[in-house]
Every structure is written in structure tokens, then in C-alpha cells.
Image (cartoon, rainbow, N blue to C red):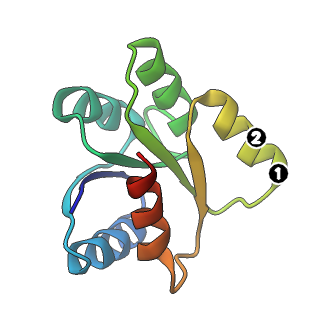
């Protein structure tokens, strides 16, 4: 199973995501904003970073740009409530590898596993 960093400021969403991934057998850590998430990603080198875009202190967009500037090549998937094409394109242009939209669906664990297997 994978080592996954969940970067999400909303406690309820973060807890739900982490519970579902933990039940699927993954090892998890979390950060409550982009700044802490960036630091943990660089220090721990997780298999996958699930990154919310709209957070306090440092947005997900800023965090992913800074990660990529530091030559971070790990898998980063945007976790967002916005399914608009413009927002998806902005995340990909910022450096995200893929996008998963909230609310979390029944096939969430399968989506995550699919991204990890592609790496």
C-alpha cells in the first residue's frame, strides 16, 4: 500500500478522506495548510499528495508551484470541490498530476489506487 499525505484544512473532509484511505490499507499523514504540506512532502517524500487548493496560510496552487520549483517529482492530485474546467486546468498548469473532485464518491479509493499504480 501507499504512503499518502493529505493536505486539507477542513477537518471533517480530512478525517473522512483519511478514514477511507486508512481502511483501504494506506499509511497516512496530514497537513492543515499548503505551507506545512509542502514541508512534509519535501521531508517525507510520500507516494501521493492529495492537495486541497483553497486553504489558509498557503494555497494549494502556491504549494504545488513551490514543490515543483524544488524539483519535487512526486505524484500530486488536486482534491477540490470545484469541477470547473478552468479550475482543473489551473491545477494542472500549477503542477498537479490529476484532479479528484469533492464530495468524495463511492469509487474514491479506486481512483486513488489507480493514480498510484500509474506511477
Asked which quadrant contains residue 13, the reply is bottom left
Q: Is residue 68 left or right of residue 94?
A: left
Q: Which of the pair 104/36 is nearer the observer? A: 104
Q: Which quarter of the rendered picture does the C terminus lie within?
A: top left
Please identify the quarter of the rendering in which residue 92 is found.
top right
**Does residue 93 sit above or below 68 in this rendering?**
below
Q: Which of the two residues, 75 or 10, is positioned nearer the viewer here?
A: 75
Where residue 61 sits: x, y (%)?
57, 33
Q: Residue furthest front?
A: 118
Q: Which residue is mark 2?
A: 89
Query: Around disc 1, counting alpha carbons within 10 Å, would you say few (fewer than 14), some (14 to 19), or many (20 or more)?
Result: few
Q: Does 101 sit left or right of 56 as displayed?
A: right
**Residue 115 point in image, percent of width and height:** 46, 56
Helix, strand or loop for disc 2:
helix
Q: Position of residue 2 (x, y in %)?
A: 24, 57
SS class, disc 1: helix
Q: Does the rendering let one see residue 8?
A: no
Question: Percent x, y for residue 117?
Answer: 39, 56
Q: Which mark is residue 85?
A: 1
Q: Which quadrant would the N terminus be assigned to in this image? A: bottom left
Q: Residue at 38% of width from left, 13% of height from top?
A: 70
Amino acid at each position: 500500500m501507499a504512503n499518502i499525505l493529505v493536505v486539507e484544512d477542513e477537518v471533517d473532509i480530512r478525517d473522512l478522506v483519511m478514514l477511507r484511505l486508512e481502511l483501504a490499507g494506506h499509511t497516512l499523514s496530514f497537513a492543515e495548510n499548503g505551507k506545512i504540506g509542502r514541508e512534509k512532502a519535501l521531508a517525507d517524500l510520500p507516494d501521493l499528495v492529495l492537495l486541497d487548493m483553497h486553504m489558509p496560510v498557503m494555497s494549494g496552487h502556491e504549494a504545488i508551484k513551490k514543490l515543483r520549483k524544488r524539483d519535487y517529482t512526486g505524484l500530486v492530485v488536486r482534491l477540490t470541490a470545484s469541477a470547473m474546467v478552468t479550475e482543473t486546468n489551473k491545477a494542472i498548469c500549477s503542477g498537479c498530476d490529476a484532479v479528484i473532485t469533492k464530495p468524495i464518491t463511492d469509487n474514491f479509493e479506486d481512483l486513488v489506487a489507480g493514480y498510484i499504480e500509474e506511477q
